[in-house]
Amino acid sequence: MSNAPDFDNADRGFVAALTPGVVTASDGRVVWDADGWAALLAGECPDTVNPSLWRQGQLCSRQGLYEVTEGIYQVRGLDISNMTIVEGDTGVIVIDPLLSVETAAAALGLYRAHRGDRPVTAVVYSHSHADHFGGVAGVTDGTVPILAPVGFMEHAVAENVYAGTAMTRRAGFMYGATLPVGPAGQIGFGLGLASSTGTVSLFPPTVHITRTGQEEIIDGVRMLFQLTPGTEAPAEMNFLFPDHRALCMAENATHTMHNVLTLRGALVRDARIWSRYLTEAITLFDGRADVLFASHHWPTWGHDDMMRFLSEQRDLYAFLHDQTLRLLNQGHTGTEIAEMIQLPPALDTAWHAGGYYGSLSHNVKAVYQRYLGWFDGNPANLWQHPPVETAQRYVDCLGGVDAVLTHARGYLDEGDLRFAAQLLQHAVFADPDRSDARELLAQVFERLAYGAENGIWRNFYLTGAQELRHGPNATPVDLGGGMAAVLSVEQIFDTLAIRVDAPKAWHDTIVIDWTFTELGQSYRTTLRNGVLLQQQDPPAGQPDLSLILTKPDLLGVLAGSGLGGIAHDGDIELLTRLAGYLDAPDPSFTIVTP
Ligand SMILES: [Zn+2]
């Protein structure tokens, strides 16, 4: 396979780098260090990194301002994602303002230093993931038009409302957030190098893209939209700049196999729909663009290369879907199919289909999960003991922890790292105080990491090794940070309901009516049988307590600012009693140890 097109394309149109390539927060904390990444990835691949993943990291480590085509620029390598800047009649349209306010401001500053101090006249969010909107307050005060696909707000917050703490914890593993940057630590994870660690912001969209074929002219720039809900994100869109002959593919076609199910945990995506929308994109946009760019990675120029890229990306998701179902309908389980399946030669050798971020193995299991769920149909797997109880019994059968370690070393000597990890996991869960078992498992995880082509797998293995040696490390990532204010009342009550400690609460009943004056909405919440139910428009019947308040009042109460000033009828102490039943999530729970 030739290296050249990717490296040439990653460098094409280079205008200038950010120098020094370091972005700091107002308190001086470094939120992005492009220079560090460049220094790390400049060298030869160390033997602690898979060479293909190293190559991907080198491509991602290029940073600076790039001209995509006349009037369209990208700032790449200053965050996990790209910011795209389109020059209009009076200013610029910013597409996907990165993850952090600080990196977004630096990116815009870099553009302005070379293209003039043009005002931002509009913002476009290509989809509902935070690395495509979180930096918005770094480029605008929110008073310009903000375009986004229909359903954007709902999904921007919904993904993190319910399982947010667990997802955040697992995202720490996925992104290797607690690992040092270096040859034996973080080296990038295929989609980008890392997430910046600045301030996340969000202004709600003001212009909703509701249908494919919708055209908008903003600051003299013509845009033609294709809605792609349920692909890489639940609310996402591709769009063409017909007058620039440039196509933005959002995150639907990037230079990696993407995730059908992200390993931090999320609702499983639909590979079938994803491939359908890529076919539609090819049909809609073929012959109308000379360059294709996305919100991660480098652009692709030229009709034939663009069409080959899009077609192969489309084939990839169709293949994942269809072949998993073919084999599943022959009775194979996800774990089995993941071992059986092989990509067709043309996709297997296409760099952009490489398993750097998603992987063939875990995507197959995701498709299986989407259709059949966790149960493989074998009743022996229906009612298993949980991990610790299972581990104790296996260790007992094998003759104790020492015997397990001996067995594990045998498999290690044969190079069967996978089974050595399975065995050692039992030893660690059966007897977590055995530091020799923990250390041996940590070493196995490291060897698995160093061989992994997938950047996410690498980070999971290395963070697992870190937990085995040093205990759980609190995760610095906060997926839901700054989101509370944009939650709906219904979502706020949901976040309370999922914190009710049921055994503590199930003998109590509390009925409260809440009237939100500024919204003109009333709700009744009922605590009974350990569940907190909610209902808009309270039915007849007397509540134990009525409250008249605003949504900010409610958020204030939840943040602990007291009940002062909230108009009420009934026993206000019931609110305190209700709060007493709420459990707190654990943001740093253990994963590879019991
Ligand atoms: Zn992204």
Image (spheres, rainbow, N blue to C red):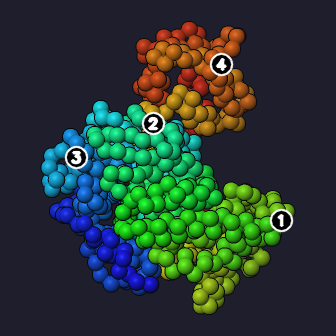
Alpha carbons under labels 2 and 4: distance apart = 38 Å
Q: Which residue is mark 1?
A: 378
Describe residue 317's horizontal placement relative to residue 15 as left or right: right
Q: Nearer the viewer, mark 2 or mark 4?
A: 2
Q: Which residue is mark 3?
A: 26
Q: Nearer the viewer, residue 90 or 348?
A: 90
Q: Nearer the viewer, residue 52 or 6?
A: 6
Residue at point 60% right, 57% down?
Answer: 276
Q: Nearer the viewer, mark 4 or mark 3?
A: 3
Amino acid type of the residue tagged 1 in the rendering: Asn
Amino acid type of the residue tagged 3 in the rendering: Ser
Describe residue 98's horizontal placement relative to residue 579 as left or right: left
Question: First in sequence: mark 2 or mark 4?
Answer: 2
Residue at point 50% right, 73% down?
Answer: 354
| Dot 1 and dot 2 residues touching (CB under 8 Å) | no
Question: First in sequence: mark 3 or mark 1?
Answer: 3
Which residue is at the far front?
287
Question: First in sequence: mark 1 or mark 2?
Answer: 2
Q: Position of residue 301 (x, y in %)?
A: 36, 67
Question: First in sequence: mark 4 or mark 1?
Answer: 1
Alpha carbons under labels 1 and 2: distance apart = 47 Å
**Residue 150 vertical placement versus 167 (above, below):** above
Alpha carbons under labels 3 and 1: distance apart = 56 Å
Q: Nearer the viewer, mark 1 or mark 2?
A: 2
Labelled disc at residue 511? 4
Amino acid type of the residue tagged 4 in the rendering: Val
**Residue 491 vertical placement versus 22 (above, below):** above
